[in-house]
Image: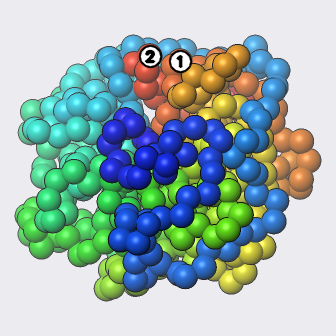
Amino acid sequence: MQRRATALRLPAAVLAGLLTSACTATTPAPGSPATPRPGVPARTAHPAGLPGCSARAAAAPRLTSAHTSLVPVGRAAFGVAVSPGRAFVSSTGPQLRVLAVGRRPALSPAGTVLAANAELAGETLTRDGRYLLVASDSGAVVFSTARAGAGSAHADLGSLQRPQGHGGGAIEVAVSASAGLAFVSLEDVAQVAVFSLHRALTHGFGPADYIGSIPTGIAPVGLAVSPGGQWLYATSELARPQPSGAGGQGSLSVISVPRAARDPAHAVVSTVAAGCQPVRVITSADGRVVWVTARGSNALLGFAADRLRADPAHALVARVQVGTAPVGLALVGGGRRIVVADSNRFHAAHASSSLAVISVPAALAGRPALLGLLPAGGFPREMALAPGGKTLLVTCFTSGQVEAVDVASLP
C-alpha cells in the first residue's frame, strides 16, 4: 500500500501479497473488490519477458563523484513539484512546505502553507505553472502557485472531491492541459477520478466539477498524461481478473483522455501486465516510451506506447533490474538517463535505500543499463526535475528530507 497497510480494505490474502515481494496469484470471491467492472478490458495482455515477484534487486557500484545534498523538511515527505525558484513538498498531513531552490543544488526553507482538513500526497503543476494540485482524500487540493510560493495563508483555492464520500485514498494527480481535466488515482476504491479543472477555476469549486471515475485494477497509484494530451497511463498494483499463472502481476492501463471527459466508465483502451506492484509511470518527452517502476519485481520496465494500444502483448521493450522496491522515477539529461528511487520501504535484509541511475539508450538496446547507485535518505519516494533540468529533487519519506541531485554530475 502506498500510505499504510490498513488503508486499503482488501481480502487478507491480497493485502499480504501486496505488502511482500513474493506475490502470489489471487482469485477474488464473487462480489469482492476484485470483481471486474464495466469499462475494464476483459483480458490483460501479458508480454513475454516480464519479471516475477521474486526477482532480486541488482547490485551496482556507488557513484561517488555525483553531487547530492539532503535538507530536512519534517516528517513524512511525500510529493514534490518545482516551479522557477520554489519547490513544494507535501506530507501526510495538512502542511505544504515551500523551499527556495538555488541555481546550484541548494535548498533552503521559504515557508509553510496549510490546507484545511487535508492529508496531502502526490503533486503536479499545471503546464502554465499557475496552479499546484496535490492529491488528497477523494480528489485534490488546488493551490495558487504564486501565493504558495510567497507563503500566503490564502494559497488554497479549493478542492476537487468525489461526491460519493470521503476515504478514496488519493495518491497521485495528473493534469491534461488540452482537455482542462484533472485525474486522481484513488487507491482504496480502485478508480481514477476525473474532474473538470477548467470548470472549477472558472465557476468555483463544487460537486459539478466531478465528471466520473475510470475503473482500474486493485490499488491504482501512478498516473501520467502523454505529451500530446490524448492518453492517460495508470498503474495498478494488482491486475484484475488474475488469470491462472499470472503470478500476482499488476497492470498498466491506457486511457483515452477525450473519452474520459465524456464517458469515464468506458475510457480504458487497453491493459497490460506490468510486473509486480507497478507504482509509478512516466513517458519520454516524445511520448514514444512509457516507463514503469515495478516495486515488487525490483525492476524498471519500458513499453512502446503505440504497441500498448495496438499490440499490448508485444509492448515491453526494456527491462532493467534496479535496487530494492523502486518507486519514483524521473528522466534527466535530456532523456538519456532515468533516476529511480530504490525505496527499500519494507526494510529488506541486507538492503538500503538508494537512487539508481540508468542509461536509456542501453536499456532500449537490451544492454546492461544500470550505471550505479547514489546514496539516499530513508524511503526515497517522489521526484521532480527543476526548470532548466540541472537539479533533481527527491522526497525521502521516512527520514523527512528532500534530496537535491546535481544532474550534471551524473555519469
Q: CA distance from mark 1 to mark 2?
A: 6 Å
Mark sitting on residue 399? 2
Residue 389 at least partly seen: no
Q: Secondary structure at mark 1?
A: loop
- Pointer 1: what residue? 377
Identified at 20% across, 70% down, the residue is: 210
| Classed neighbour count for the residue bearing mark 1: other residues with Cα under 10 Å, few (<14), some (14–19), many (≥20) | many
**Position of 116 relative to 160 (above/below):** above
Image quadrant in which you'd find residue 262 = bottom left
Identified at 60% across, 79% down, the residue is: 43
Task: Tally the marks.
Answer: 2
Q: Quadrant of the N terminus?
A: top left
Identified at 40% across, 77% down, the residue is: 37
Q: Position of residue 326 (x, y in %)?
A: 61, 38
**Mark positioned earlier in the residue sequence (1 or 2):** 1
Question: Viewed as shown, does residue 229 lie left or right of 86?
Answer: right
Cβ–Cβ under 8 Å for marks 1 and 2:
yes
**Position of 124 relative to 127 (above/below):** above
The residue nearer to you, when weighing 387 against 117, is 117
Q: Secondary structure at mark 2?
A: loop
Identified at 32% across, 17% down, the residue is: 74
Q: Position of residue 197 (x, y in %)?
A: 24, 65
Here the colouring is rainbow
Q: Quadrant of the C terminus?
A: top right
| Classed neighbour count for the residue bearing mark 2: other residues with Cα under 10 Å, few (<14), some (14–19), many (≥20) | some
Amino acid type at image mark 1: Gly
Amino acid type at image mark 2: Ser
The residue nearer to you, when weighing 119 against 227, is 119
Question: Viewed as shown, does residue 71 lie left or right of 99?
Answer: right
